Amino acid sequence: MLDSVNTTQYILAGTQAAQNQLKKNEKTSKTPQSVFSQLLKEAEEEKEPPLVNLSNVENLPFDSALEVLQDTLMTAADDLKQHPVPENVEAYKKAVGSFIAFVSKNAYSLSEKARAQKNGVKPPPLYTIEVINSKLDRLASDILFNQKREISLVARVDEITGLVVNLLA
């Protein structure tokens, strides 16, 4: 009878130790998460591939590259309208940036003109921007004008993100 009592005590002690260890593990692994952080985690798991590899646009003919960038911008804008999530904001930012970089490279020319020295002080150079492709300039203006809502949404998101970062710092 003494053996069975000692054995039962050992079994109970081992069971309690195992239960205590499980509770500790549950506490450390189950940190309370907000709904927002859970949604972000789910969104990261469901990431879609980017719309277009924008680095390959440089190898395309001018018209094709313009069409691809314009389609990418419009698709990103539609996605942002339908689902204003962080991934769509980033995709839209990249699409706008790529489109503007393409327009800047192909629609404008920057020239620098040195100015004469006055009283031994060399003034900064004079920069002139010339419009080379007025059709592309007009197209870019029209597209960006039509994207005002999305651009203001992205600006507000960036402003809020900056405020949050400032609060955390």
Image (cartoon, grey):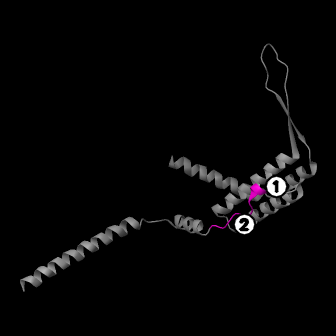
Residue 54, image x and y in percent?
75, 57
Residue 64, image x and y in percent? 87, 60
On the rendered structure, is 149 left or right of 107? left
Helix, strand or loop at mark 1: helix
Q: How far apart are the alpha carbons under marks 2 and 1? A: 26 Å
Q: x, y (%) of residue 159?
A: 64, 51
Span shown in magenta: 47-56
Which of 94 and 56 lies nearest the eye of the viewer?
56
Dominant SS of magenta comes to loop
Q: Which residue is mark 2?
A: 79
Categorize mark 1 by other alpha carbons within 10 Å: few (<14), some (14-19), many (20+).
Answer: few
Please tell me whether residue 134 is drawn above or below residue 12 in the rendered image: above
Comparing 153 with 140, the one in front is 140
Residue 56, quarter of picture: bottom right
Q: Report the residue at 15% width, 78% height from top.
A: 9
Q: Quadrant of residue 90?
A: bottom right
Mark 2: amino acid:
Asp
Task: Give the amino acid type for the residue marked by disc 1 in the picture.
Answer: Asn
